[in-house]
């Protein structure tokens, strides 16, 4: 089991993207987080989910997809291809890291980060083995959706009606294994008591089912 002190800061790539890596003993996979606009590696909700995934035996990597200067440009914040390329950069970095290189990789995307996660998964189908979206905008992946091969779980709150519709339409374009989980009584940010824990249950199930084994096993 990993404790808070086992989660250590790391820097990724020549850009020095700031990240937090946590690898429990005998980890069964690595989940890389893609946050939504205005958020980052310190996101309380993503850290809550990450802590639970580590307890379930999954490694986690929470990273800032943009440098501090890039975050000042609103165009960069919503540049899905750019954000996806940073996820792919983090995936390549993990494939060289001694604690993570043997682990299969999944992406966890929140809000706009879900679009980036799906575009990133479509670009690297041999590396990304599962995707989970929390209150996400998978529609932002656009024409990349039919190219996603990684099994994809879309989690939406029952009170987040516009986003439910966007997820249903995006799901219809996915050709991979996919599931839509609607969390009763939850709004877009899953702030209602207990709702984020339901997200954790769904995400843990999905990643443990699809990230078992090692990266080398194909």
Image: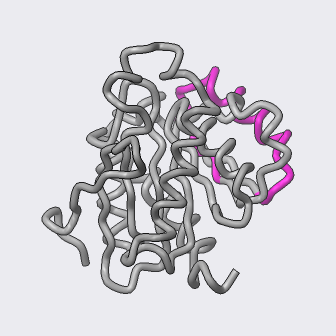
Of residues 190 and 212, the one nearer the viewer is 212
Front residue of 24 and 52: 24
Residue 190: x and y in percent read 41, 36
* Quadrant position of residue 149: bottom right
In the picture shown, does residue 40 fall above or below 101? above
Magenta part of the protein: which range? 153-177
Locate residue 40, reporting x and y percent.
34, 36
Q: Is residue 31 left or right of residue 17?
A: right
Residue at the spot 72% in from the left edge and 66% down from the top edge? 126
Residue sticking out furthest to the front: 14
Most distant residue in the left direction: 5
Q: Position of residue 174 (x, y in %)?
A: 82, 46
Residue at position x 52%, y 51% from top? Answer: 89
User: Residue at left 51%, top 21%?
Assistant: 76
Query: Looking at the picture, does residue 128 appear above or below residue 71?
Result: below
Q: Is residue 33 left or right of residue 123?
A: left
**Is 212 located above or below residue 17 in the figure?**
below
| Rendering colour mode | one colour
Whether residue 154 appears in magenta in the rendering, the answer is yes
From the top left corner, tell me how far across and down residue 158 is, in percent. 56, 33
Q: Residue at x 59, y 40 (%)?
A: 84
**Which quadrant of the figure contains the N terminus?**
bottom left
Up-down: is 217 above or below 173?
below
Q: Quadrant of residue 145?
A: top right
Residue 173 sits inside the magenta stretch: yes
- Asked if one can make out residue 183 in the rendered structure from this viewpoint, the answer is no
- Find residue 16 and report its image quarter: top left
Looking at the image, residue 215 sits to the left or right of residue 198; the answer is right
């Amino acid at each position: 089991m990993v404790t808070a002190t086992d989660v250590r800061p790391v820097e990724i790539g020549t850009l020095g993207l700031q990240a937090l890596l946590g690898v429990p003993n005998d980890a069964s996979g690595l989940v890389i987080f893609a946050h939504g606009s205005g958020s980052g590696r310190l996101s309380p909700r993503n850290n809550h989910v990450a802590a639970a995934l580590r307890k379930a035996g999954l490694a986690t990597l929470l990273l800032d997809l943009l440098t501090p200067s890039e975050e000042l440009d609103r165009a960069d914040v919503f540049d899905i291809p750019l954000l996806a390329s940073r996820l792919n950069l983090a995936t390549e970095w993990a494939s060289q890291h001694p604690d993570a290189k043997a682990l299969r990789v999944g992406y966890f995307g929140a809000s706009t980060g879900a679009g980036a996660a799906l575009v990133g998964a479509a670009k690297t189908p041999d590396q990304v083995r599962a995707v989970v979206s929390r209150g996400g905008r998978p529609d932002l992946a656009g024409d990349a959706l039919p190219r996603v091969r990684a099994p994809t779980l879309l989690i939406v709150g029952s009170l987040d009606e516009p986003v439910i519709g966007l997820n249903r339409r995006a799901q219809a374009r996915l050709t991979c294994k996919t599931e839509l989980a609607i969390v009763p009584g939850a709004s877009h940010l899953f702030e209602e008591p207990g709702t984020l824990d339901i997200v954790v249950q769904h995400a843990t199930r999905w990643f443990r089912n699809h990230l078992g084994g090692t990266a080398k096993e194909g």
